[in-house]
Image (tube, rainbow, N blue to C red):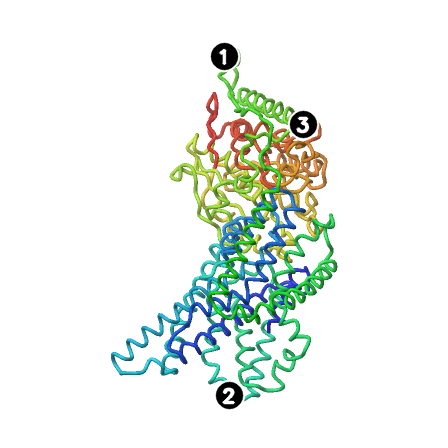
Amino acid sequence: MRAVAILAVVAYHAGLSTVPGGYVGVDVFFVISGFLITGHLNRELTERGGISFGAFYARRARRLLPSSLLVIGVTVAISCLVLPPLQAMAVAKDGLANVFYVGNYRYALQATNYLSAGGPVSPLLNYWSLGVEEQFYLVWPAILVLTSLIWWRSSTRHRGASPRQPQPLVSTVFVALALLGAGSLVLSIWLTGVNEPWAFFSLPTRAWELAVGGLVSLVALRLRRLPGGAMAVVGWAGIGAIIVSALTFTAATPYPGTAAMVPVAGAAAVVAGGCAFHRLGPVWLLGRRPMQVVGRVSYTWYLWHWPALILVPFIVGHRVSVWGNVIVCLLALVLAAVTTVVLERPLQQAPWLAWPRRTLSFTAGLSAAVIATILLSTAALPSLTGIGHTPARKLELHAQTGTDQTRSPTSRAVAAAQTLTSQVQADVAQSMDVQAVPANLTPSLADAVSDEAAPFVDGCFDGFTENNVNPCNYGNVTAPPSKTVVLFGDSHALMWFSAYDNLANQYGWRLIPQAKATCPPINITVYSPTLGGWYTGCNQWRTAVVARIQALHPALVVLGFSREYGIPDDRVVVDGPAWMQGLSSMIETLRATGAQVVLMGDVPYPQSGLVPDCLSAHLTKPGACLVPEQYPFFNPSGVGQEKALAAAAGASYIETTPWFCASNTCAVIVNNILVYRDDNHITATYASWLTPVFGADLEVATNGLFGTPPIGPTTAKVH
């Protein structure tokens, strides 16, 4: 069974398209762990009347910690050698979290917005499942003991029963575990629809999978009495359920939720079927030597293969093909076998570790050694703080006098927009020549990833699998439709939120963000390489947003979207006939509601990867991270087409290129402000700094829909 689980996981991680749901192998591991641990603890409880916590945790530590700590230490050390300093520091933090087996909650916190922004994948991400299991091991023995005490007091008080009567006690434990599992399953299904990362990574939403294995172990004796032939059929049906899950589930499958019930039920069926031996059952396959060998090294293979897949491209200096990934995984299998033979097995059999206290002391020492390794590795990293200094500057539109006051509101708005744009252009051009990353960089390189607009983190940004429209409102939530603005699109619409939020608070607007990961506000079906299929959920969500806009009758709808669709997959052609027709159709639909429509231009895409990482590796040469204006994702000619189409369809267009580029090059730092938080989204700080020019351009685009912006410095609220 472990072989089935690890082969599915490795195939999925290697990128084999035939196994898009191989991640279900982790669920199989959970069921197996629940079965073995519960069975062992239940036998000890019924035979001895209690559980030796010291002996239990010593066995777990001796079995799991040596290999786990070794991989953490090696991974962090190599990461500090080959990764950009900022990324290496993040891996070190992951390592510290995983030493204490709480990495899954660190990943849950980080993953609340990972679908909305490009970001490096941690080489220790696979440790999330170990965190779930270790946390289960921490609480489950105590729950069993508490259950037995409650049963013993109840039975001795009412029936005078002995505390060592096994069957009534097993029944009580079964009920307790069933209730715990049911509650966990309900929570998992609910949270998958509300916050999928937390549902995926946390113990409370995964405990039911371990509980299912535990329930099977509690009825194992009864299962042995059932007909072997019938149980063989049950076992093969379970194998089929696991295989179907691995072959048909994709990244688009809401997970764990109800979908996880299929592989979990399959794994439980295989284990249950094996309780009544039949030579034609799954044991015919699982009992063969190759499967047994893979199963024995499955734990260490799981530990090694993922760090290898993530770090090898950095070591060799280029991306690795799918078949290259397969080779890397096979080499990791060899490394896993060596680790098992040289480290894991000898420590498990060492006589001097037979006493629990010695084992716990030894593994505590190992943990301390790995923590020291992590700290020493990070101490060798270069500083993440620049040595330059650039003064902060505000965008200001000072009061105009003389003949300017006699101009029409429209001409004054145009003049204000031109003046502010010229200021931005001057700052952008001056920032091209900066010789060192400013020490007063805002946000700092370490804080860049979290410098994002509020909706990204407060549940108002819809992820890939969320098709319901969120009801979020900002600004003056009681404002009438005549002062209501809808920000509609993907994450590239929402990254402008901070500027619009500032304006909403100044003017008393009601601001409604409606944004979904990689879902453009265009009537076209896009293909998602991440999900591995056509993004039909985007169509459903988009239809629901349009229906809400039709009910709201807002004064203004702002459209924003990325221009990265179709890259690297070519099934959608940005600025092709279908794209342009879909955009025109959407503008017409929105204008029919009575709203004005403004189309936001996109931003240049850094070709150096994650900008904070690039700058961390070039603190004294930030010019290495500058962005060429002419690049395939941006497609300047396509921008011109969209601008012309918007005008023809009755919408306005806000050109954003002058806020980033000068002389065919685009900045990543403007004054002391970091422009990008990753490889395609701007920081909330930069969007907020642009508020005055936003307001001026928006007044021109909407013919003063919300009134003249205030004259003088604009106070920008930074999220």
Percent across and percent down for residue 155 are 29, 79
Percent across and percent down for residue 163 are 33, 80
Could you tell me how far apart the alpha carbons at marks 1 and 2 are, in whole angstroms?
A: 95 Å
Q: Is residue 121 above or below residue 648?
A: below
State which mark lies toward you, 1 or 3.
Answer: 3
Q: Residues within 10 Å of mark 3 (few under 14, many from 20)?
A: some
Circle 3 sits on which residue? 662
Q: Amino acid at mark 2?
A: Leu
Percent across and percent down for residue 204 are 44, 61
Circle 2 sits on which residue? 226
Image mark for residue 401? 1
Left or right, 145 with respect to 700, comes to left
Q: Is residue 174 above or below residue 696?
A: below
Q: Are marks 1 and 3 in contact (CB under 8 Å)?
A: no
Q: Residues within 10 Å of mark 2 (few under 14, many from 20)?
A: some
Image mark for residue 55? none
Q: Secondary structure at mark 3?
A: strand
Which image quarter is the N terminus in?
Answer: bottom right
Percent across and percent down for residue 443 are 54, 35
Q: Are marks 1 and 2 in contact (CB under 8 Å)?
A: no
Q: Residue at x 50, y 42 (%)?
A: 593
Q: Quadrant of residue 298?
A: bottom right
Left or right, 641 with respect to 228, comes to right
Number of marks in the rendered image: 3
